[in-house]
């Protein structure tokens, strides 16, 4: 394959060897090859439709490109750093294979609109793959919420026991966060799916191109309106990275809980041996490496967002070589998110819930104190007074080392004479959970109906 630069005509000296390596992107952008070839085929076919290429020339180009795709698929393509990037590698190979007519492919386009198009096609697929993976994880969470909806755990604020909740309700909280993540990806997909091709280097082209034809062939919603904007901005990629950073933040919070819950101190869940590792020195250890690593990877995902924001911040219109730096953060983020979602889906499918331990923990923290206060309000005691009475009852329980439920009626009546036998119904964990029986509440039956609605929402 010839390593001759397309711009050799204007240059008197060859490129410095290190500069060649420094400026090349083929080491990482080769993964765009399928999109690059699809874009080139659509471009060539459009050129033939408007009469810029002869049908025979177009056929030969399309055939050559398909063969090159097979070469790359099969690992039989010799990538060359001298040819800088995926675009020039493929174009040079095309001319190798089909001769002079290969040189006509680049009529009416530039690598600037070519690369912008390739990234959008790549990212559109990536968003679809992430959406699928998110859906899989959401389904696992719904199954778990349904199966364990009667398990009661302490709900926390400030990581202190607050009020008892259904474990299913807790899982549904994660479902909702992922549902919004999914919405963010779907929303940024609309702005990804706009076609730069035809913008050429920056100002458009003198050939009578039909951009609607190319856009339709590539499945874009529309051609971009402004050529300068289309070749240069990467805000669609920033939006994607931002949606990914938010998803990573959610998975990191989730991980934090799983790490706590699998500790000997909480002992709420068992993550499954297949998802943990041991220690080389401490024989008793079973470490929650998977959630820890997912939490740790949040750093690189946030970093990738900051990297591209910063790459873009001082660029004048239109394309600048700075833009070449858009790819690695994108690729890394896509790979990282797909890996995290996959491992999470598999891990959550086999997680074991230790219902007795959760229930015992909820019993330890006076989790039904608010219910007692609400009970007193029902007996016509103002909430602020009720709050104070219950505070004293809790202090008494702490001193006696008993739970609220274990208090004798006469002792309770010592704090407030309006308390009756019926108080025990509200002091139980089950009574407390099921009293929150409204849309969005934690009552068992509401958790089940929320699961049913969530399944419906996933189909809409
Ligand atoms: N490898 C380049 C990139 O990723 C392709 C576009 C190069 N355009 C140029 N005018 N040098 O951005």
Image (spheres, rainbow, N blue to C red):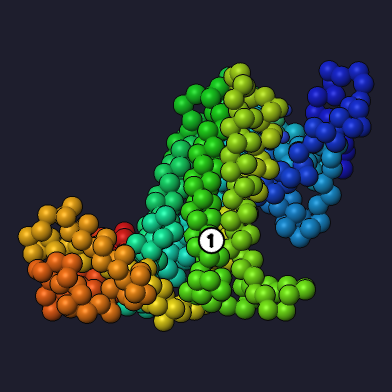
Q: Position of residue 321 (x, y in %)?
A: 70, 27
Name the residue rendered at 81%, 52% in the picture. 77
Work out whether 439 lies above or below 39.
below
Q: Name the quarter where the C terminus is drawn.
A: bottom left
| SS state under label 1 | helix
Name the residue rendered at 31%, 60% in the picture. 457
Q: Position of residue 324 (x, y in %)?
A: 69, 34
Q: Name the quarter where the N terminus is drawn.
A: top right
Q: Position of residue 151 (x, y in %)?
A: 36, 77
The residue nearer to you, when weighing 285 against 17, is 285
Residue annotated with mark 1 = 255
31 sits to left or right of 258 = right
Q: Rate crowding at label 1 as few (under 14), some (14 to 19) or many (20 or more) other CA atoms within 10 Å.
A: many
333 sits to left or right of 191 = right
Name the residue rendered at 22%, 57% in the picture. 388
Quadrant containing ligand 1 reads top right
**Residue 27 appearing in the image:** yes
Work out whether 295 lies above or below 455.
above
């Amino acid at each position: 394959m010839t390593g001759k630069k397309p711009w050799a005509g204007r240059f008197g000296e060859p490129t410095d060897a290190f500069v060649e390596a420094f400026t090349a992107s083929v080491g990482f952008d080769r993964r765009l090859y399928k999109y690059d070839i699809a874009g080139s085929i659509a471009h060539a076919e459009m050129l033939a439709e408007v009469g810029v290429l002869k049908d025979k020339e177009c056929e030969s180009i399309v055939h050559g490109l398909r063969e090159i795709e097979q070469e790359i698929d099969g690992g039989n393509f010799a990538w060359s750093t001298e040819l800088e990037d995926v675009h020039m590698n493929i174009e040079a190979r095309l001319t190798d294979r089909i001769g002079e007519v290969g040189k006509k492919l680049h009529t009416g386009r530039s690598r600037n609109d070519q690369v912008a198009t390739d990234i959008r096609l790549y990212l559109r697929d990536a968003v679809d793959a992430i959406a699928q993976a998110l859906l899989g994880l959401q389904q696992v969470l719904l199954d778990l919420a349904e199966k364990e909806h009667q398990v009661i755990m302490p709900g926390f604020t400030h990581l202190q026991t607050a009020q008892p909740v259904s474990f299913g309700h807790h899982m549904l909280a994660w479902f909702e966060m992922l549902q919004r993540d999914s919405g963010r990806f779907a929303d940024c997909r609309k702005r990804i799916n706009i076609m730069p091709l035809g913008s050429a280097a920056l100002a458009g082209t003198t050939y009578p191109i039909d951009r609607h034809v190319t856009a339709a062939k590539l499945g874009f919603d529309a051609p971009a309106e402004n050529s300068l904007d289309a070749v240069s901005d990467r805000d669609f990629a920033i939006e994607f990275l931002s949606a990914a950073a938010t998803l990573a933040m959610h998975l990191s919070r989730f991980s934090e809980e799983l790490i706590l819950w699998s500790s000997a101190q909480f002992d709420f869940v068992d993550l499954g041996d297949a998802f943990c590792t041991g220690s080389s020195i401490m024989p008793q250890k079973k470490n929650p490496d998977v959630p820890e690593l997912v939490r740790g990877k949040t750093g690189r995902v946030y970093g990738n967002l900051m990297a591209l924001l910063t790459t873009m911040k001082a660029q004048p219109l239109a394309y600048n070589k700075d833009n070449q730096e858009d790819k690695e953060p994108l690729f890394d983020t896509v790979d990282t998110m797909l890996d995290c979602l996959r491992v999470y889906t598999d891990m959550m499918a086999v997680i074991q819930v230790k219902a007795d331990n959760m229930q015992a923990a909820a019993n330890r923290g006076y989790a039904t104190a608010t219910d007692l206060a609400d009970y007193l309000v029902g007996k016509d005691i103002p909430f602020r007074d009720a709050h104070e009475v219950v505070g004293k009852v809790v202090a008494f329980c702490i001193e006696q080392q008993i739970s609220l439920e274990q208090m004798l009626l006469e002792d309770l009546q010592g704090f407030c004479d309006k308390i009756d036998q019926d108080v025990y119904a509200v002091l139980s964990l089950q009574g407390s959970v099921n009293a929150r029986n409204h849309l969005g509440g934690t009552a068992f039956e509401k958790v089940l109906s929320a699961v049913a609605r969530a399944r419906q929402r996933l189909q809409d």
